[in-house]
Amino acid sequence: VVVGGSKGGVYSWDSDSGVEYRQYDEGHTGPVQTVMCYPMEDGSHVIISCGAADHTIVVWDLETANKRATIVINELEHAKNLRYHISKDGTQVLVWCTDSVPFPNLIFVDALNNAKNSVYCHEGFVRHAVFAKDAAKIISCGSDGKIVMWDTVTLEPQITLTGHVDSVLCCGINDEGTRIVSSGEDCTIRIWSAEDGRQLQMMMAQDEPVKMCAFAKSGNKILTCDTTGRVYVWNTLSEIILNLIRRYADNISCVAMTNDHSLMAAGCNNGRIMMWDVDKRELLWEYSHHTGRVEAVAFNSLKDTVATAGADGRVSLIAVDSGKQVNCFLGQDEPITSISFSPDDERLAGCSADGKLLLYQVDSTGRKPKFVLRNNIARITSFVWSPNSKLIAGCGSDGCVLVWNATSGSIFTVLEGDSAATCCAFDFIGKLLAVGTLMGTTVLYNLETAEMLCELRNNASPIREVVFNQDTTRLTSVCSRQAIIWDVATTMKIRTYDFVVDKNNDFKAQPNPYRTTVAHNSTVLFDHESEGVVYDMMAAEDPLLRSYFLTDTRCIGTGHSHKTVTVWSAAGNTGPDKFHTTHDAITSCHFSHDDRLIVMGTQDGNVVVYDVLHNETVEVIAAHQNGPCRCVKLSHDNNEILSCGADAKVILWDWRKRAATRIYSGHFISIGCCDMAYQGTRVVSGDNHGMISVWEKETGNNVQTLPLAHSKALLSISMSADGSTIASVGADDKVSIWNVDLGIELVSLTAAIESHPLYCSFSPDGNKLAVTESNGNVMIWNAIAGCQWYIISEAHKGKVSSCSWSFDCRRLVTAGADSVMAVWDSESGAPLHKFNVKAGTLSCVSVSPQGIYVAAGSNSGTLSVINVPTASRHVPEPSFLYNWLATHEPKPSALLYMRLASQHPTIANVQDAQGWSLINHCMSKGNAAVANIVFNAIQDGTGSCGLISAVPFTIQTRVKFHSPGEGGDDDGPNSSGPSMVNASGRSMSMGVAGLRKKSVSRKKSFAGSKKLNGSVGAGQIEGSGDSGLRDVLVQKSVKSFSQQIKKVAVELFTEKRDMDHMELIMNNALALALNSKSSECVQVLLDAAADEKASWGSYHAVTDMMPSLAVRYPYMCYQFLASLQLQKLGDLEVPVAVMQGLDKSVIRTAPIFTNVKNLWQSFLQLHEVKHGPQPYAHVKASMVRLPFACSIGKESLLQTLVESNVPVQAYGTPTVRAVIKHKWRLYGRLRLSIRALIYCAYTVIFTTYAVLYSQEDHSLSREEYWDSSTKAKVHLIMDGYLFLQALWYAWVEINQIWAIGILLYLRSWWNTVDLVSITMMPVICCLHIARAAMNPGSALNPMVAIEVILVYFKIFFYALAFEPTGPVVHMVFSIAFAVKNWAVLLFLAMVAFGTSLMVLYQYVLYPPGAWYRQGAENYTNFAEMLWTMWKMVIGSYYQLDANMESGEWPEITLIIFSIFMFGVQIVMLNMLIALMSSIFNQVRNTEEDVFLRGRAQLIVEVETLMSNRQLESYALMPPYVHLLTPVQRQVHNGNSIEARLARVEAMLKEHVEAFLNYMRNQAMNPGLRVMQDMAPAAPAEGAIVPAADAHANQNALPPAPPGFMYVQGPNGTMIMVPMDPSVMGYGMMPGMMGMGMVTDPVTGALMSAQEQINMITLQAQKLRESESQLPAILRQIDRLQRTINNQEMRMEGMVTVLRDIENLLRNQQPVIIHQETRPPPPRRGAVLTEAELELEVKRLLGKQEEKL
């Protein structure tokens, strides 16, 4: 052992004895940095020591301690920091300087030969350098980010390696000299090829700079250390994996590794299995054991056996060492997609494509599975073994996870879930089970209690793999876009890895501790245990490579050590896989429920079953012999195919047996379409005669026949999931929805179709119906709400031939004649993806249930299949993209997003697994800056952005464990099953104020829970002799065995998952913005909606959130309503006679908003209008954008606005105005009119009552008063009526308080007045009947007096609702409330001056009986004083005489009185007049808005007082508010006289102000510079020229520049000012225009300023006179036009009569002409021209040569 000392000494020890061997002194003058001992060829040993400070290299003899050589590095004598590296043979030394120096910084030293060579390398300084193999090459790295390979002898650079973003801190090379490793400040480790310099891999785990890296001696591991001291050991097995994937990318199908990573097995598409030795990097053997693709490979724990599963349904056990088959097992008829050994290697489990779990005994001699575990309700998608091999868990597509006992095949427990389960994993001890779902969530269950512990959200796509680490502290959830590391104890997210395909290097970023961006363009490996990422830097060479293995995220299993390697790849073709049939055109296609098979119908009558996963044809059936196969449907269990064709047959096929199961008879002509109910047992078909037939699927019995459903051929038909409703589209352009059981048409959708309908399809939940049209539109009808939900305008260029729904109802796929397949969000109608398959006209389309695959058939016989996740992998995922844009500067973020939006137009709508788009993420985080970037990239009016996404529709499996006593055949009372916790019991909360549900529910439950027959969840035991148990399993289908072999009844039933309203809120961008409490985000969304950037369906989301918006941001709500214009739908021509009986605008609600002609045809009864010459009015059809704006209830738009603090101008916005007007006409006017009439009668009766009360004798008793007169009897009867009427009003007010709450009720002072009045009326009636409190001074008299005022005051309330009186009442009250401050000031003045007069009047002496005695008594108390001061305000002054006659201080009294009268009557009263004038103008501006608010308040009061039956009758009000308004034609354009007159007036004002300003400046600055000397150059603007000189010689004035002219100022000087082009020619001579001078048009002399003003005023007056004559001229023109129209109509009628006569004469047959049945004349524009009309009349009259 040799050691260098800090003082320059070198020491050696004997490593065996530990005794010091030698000491080597006097070699160095400072610390020794590096020392090594090497053997020489002659058997001796040398020591090479390198000094840190003296820059010296010394070669010592080990045995003699003598110096062999001393080398001083003079080249680096001025450097401070040196580093050394000695070659392995000890003969060469590398010296480099780590400082930035201008001289050579890398020195090669031959220590034995004392030779040196130097070179300057790396800009900056050298970080590290090493020798390659045999010291023939030198590898160096520096601060310039480069790694350079040098020739050792010549020091010439051989290869330069670039790729690191920043400085390269360390480099190394393996012993073979083939690979170079480097690490740098960018936190990455990179592996390079030493041969050609290619970057092979990049590894990343640390988030700190990596300061050291080196290969191990074996070359299979790499050691790295970062600046924080964390050490990572990397296994280079990733290299062989990447090489294998790269080399066999188009053939490899599956990969598996052993626990120690020493062996790797790969399955191929051609059925071959390859075995690789990872350490030696060589292929051990390759054999073929399957006839089709190898679907899965798995090693056992002993590494001696490998199991393979193939598409041929076989499982093979193969010896690892020889590759020979040891055993073979048979599966089912379907391919086995996954396989795994149990941890004890005794059992083998495989999952088949049809959702069955097969268990095999490894040492069994039988070839069939021991157990077949199944769930007949759903498919098993994946499985996992427990660590003790006793349990096996299977994930169901219904969200249920079944855990079986592997020994007995019985159910251990059942775990319920809300979404389809995709994968699962046990922890290391088997107590926890993690389940990944299709929604991107991971659910943790406790197996001992079957309790759900937590739910981990935020994965961007469906979970592909969940893995625990060794100590169960962390959980990794992997999807196709992300890997998230979770803390199991706290359920907190530790770190997120975003895997992004980045070809343009847009997302290169430094890693951080919380979120790492893995931007790549090749293949990436991820190890969850070490959180290490390995990049393959070599992209796929073939851009058209179609790799099955690389189409999705793959997880390479490594046995049962809880270690997996996840593979992401950017390789492969993102285009469609095209299957070219040998048959004719594809007429129909339909996916299976497992996303694997697709069935096609062809033009030559064949039915083709195609395997999408394996890209192969499974079966071809010659289904129809005499014509094409029109339509095909695949059953839910994938066992049967329904087909129909031109041979008038509807056939149900068992496609595996190629046999017809049933033929449905009833049609006698070609059948064009058919469908099969998903949930029910019915099939339906339609033929070319328009007949629809419905049959029972199993029996073939006819359920319903509709012989005259359509007048022409059926084009498409669709049946709801339960089979109770069908929708049909016919060639007669009719779209109808039918009730099957009743055989009646429920609704016709023809009015909602703008062009020819082509295809229809029900959503799986039965809520929506999609109808495609020939003009490229797709209409979505809500079958529950009974209205058109939205329309996708111009979805395709040309006709839309077909559409299809995903099973979760989140996606709608359409295909058209433009060869494009488009994917849309089903809730908002926003585009998600568009794929141009370039296969010609597409005839049909289908989407797989989970939305993974989209397939379309074309008329050319090509089936195009697109893997949507693979095709969209180049589009950044929303959560990642938001995080990237939010963490970078706004400007580069905006540029990046604009570039991405140009490449991917639908990037704003791309959704993650939860359904959130980029907008949703912005809103949830309250980031308005990123939202602005997104919306700024969208053009106004495009309507392409979705603000809401669909909530998935799922059918859940519920589990019920019955106690032993319930089954009837249990073993004992102590038997019990495990307790189950219903996962649906969870609840969510969200802080959004005013959340509401729509009055029309958007959800529909199935007709009941469906209990399925069959062995539910039970294992089928091979060769079991227990026939009694088997009978129980078959008959009851709900029995199984627990782990203790005790009978426990397990009932599984399906039901529709309740759609929680909160789920819709969670996917509503506006709700997320409100919940984030970011007003900026809310404003951004509202601006986007107002600018028509949101899709049609997104306005439903806005309507849902209007209550919350009005409560939280009232002014923002007003601004949105003000900017939200009505949607223009088109123009119509309506007879004037029809419009005369209506108001200026016609308003109605309708369930549709397309085809406005049909919409208004029936409403205006235009079909009853007689044809003939008549005037027409041009009207505009428009619609309120917010659907359900006229809904009724507590959360309706109008009631929300009334209860909120929105400005009054909000009621004048187009939307709210239309809502108020419609509700007023619908029920407000009638109900308020009735209430007003009743109240008027009530007021008249009470007025009569008060008059009689004032005339009665209050001293009489009740009996005496009754007998006194008839009036008295009437008076007492009025008491009873008023009492009952008051009680009724009290009941009404109580109902209103109950409906809106006491606080909201008391916010209106009208309600306070009502409450007081209603309370007093019964009291008055009771006291009057009791003859109590009627004496003088009692309370009844003032109560009656006050009640009279209150009763009459309520009349104003009803007057508010009617147009003649409403504005006046509003104006009166507004002015009264506006002068309250003035009234307070007046009251203070009265109190002040009145109190002073009281003081002065206390000494007034007056004789008894004096006439001014009463004036003095007016100041005896405070009340009298106020009354006196008020009389003085209104002009009564006689009270002053008492003080003036006999007062002590008359002079002071007179002064105070004068001041009071001056301040009140002169100042304050005049101020009141001016104030009221100003208030009147203000009120007049908002008069209509205030009136509308009052009417809205009354309408809301009417709604709150409606009964439940009345509310239900109006609850089904159609959602869309339509308006017809006359078109206001602009007679005067911008160049008309009126416009020019306005510009002249504006110019006149500007010139007058300019002259006045000039005169002021002239007066203030007499020394203003005047142009005395006229230079030839053009003067500047505002320059002044003396008028005398100008008149003397006008030619001396220089020409005015263009746009300027000379005018004469007040002091006679000429001023150059800009000209207004709008008044060119007025008051200017043509010859003077070029010079810019204003002259008199008669004399030609220059005009003064006043003359110019007078001339302009005169011209303006003339223009006004001309303008006043314009209406008369226009009326004359209109009369002439009507006369011409009438003449043309008469001529057209004459032509029609003459043609009839001509036909009569030619046919010689009697013809009866009926005026009523005569066809209507053609519309204007379609008639003959005047010349053609004249020729036609001449021809008919036989006067071709004569003049008419």
Image (cartoon, rainbow, N blue to C red):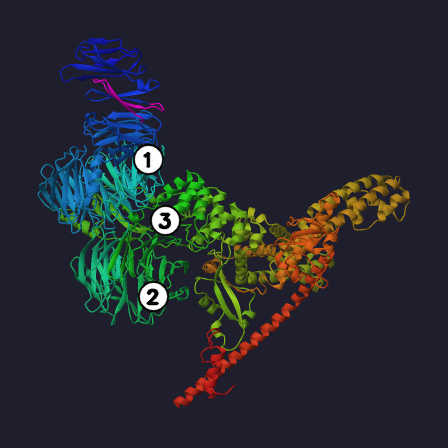
- Lower position in the chain sequence, tag 3 or tag 2: 2
Residue type indicated by callout 2: Val
Within 10 Å of disc 2 (Cα), the crowding (few <14, some 14-19, many 20+) is many
Residue type indicated by callout 1: Trp
Q: Above or below — where is 53 with respect to 253?
A: above
Q: Mark 2 points at which residue?
A: 729
> 1491 left or right of 496?
right
Residues in magenta?
Answer: 98-120
Residue toward you, 343 or 41: 41
Residues at marks 3 and 2, CA–CA distance in whole angstroms: 37 Å
Residues at marks 1 and 3, CA–CA distance in whole angstroms: 34 Å
Residue toward you, 128 or 1256: 128
Q: Name the residue under label 3.
A: 903
Nearer the camera: disc 3 or disc 2: 3
Residue toward you, 157 or 999: 157
Task: Estimate the x, y position of residue 761 in percent, counting from the top left.
Answer: 33, 60
> 81 left or right of 428?
right
Task: Estimate the x, y position of residue 339 in percent, counting from the top left.
Answer: 18, 42
Q: Name the residue under label 1.
A: 486
- Lower position in the chain sequence, tag 1 or tag 2: 1
User: Would residue 1625 be counted in the magenta stretch?
Assistant: no
- Lower position in the chain sequence, tag 1 or tag 3: 1
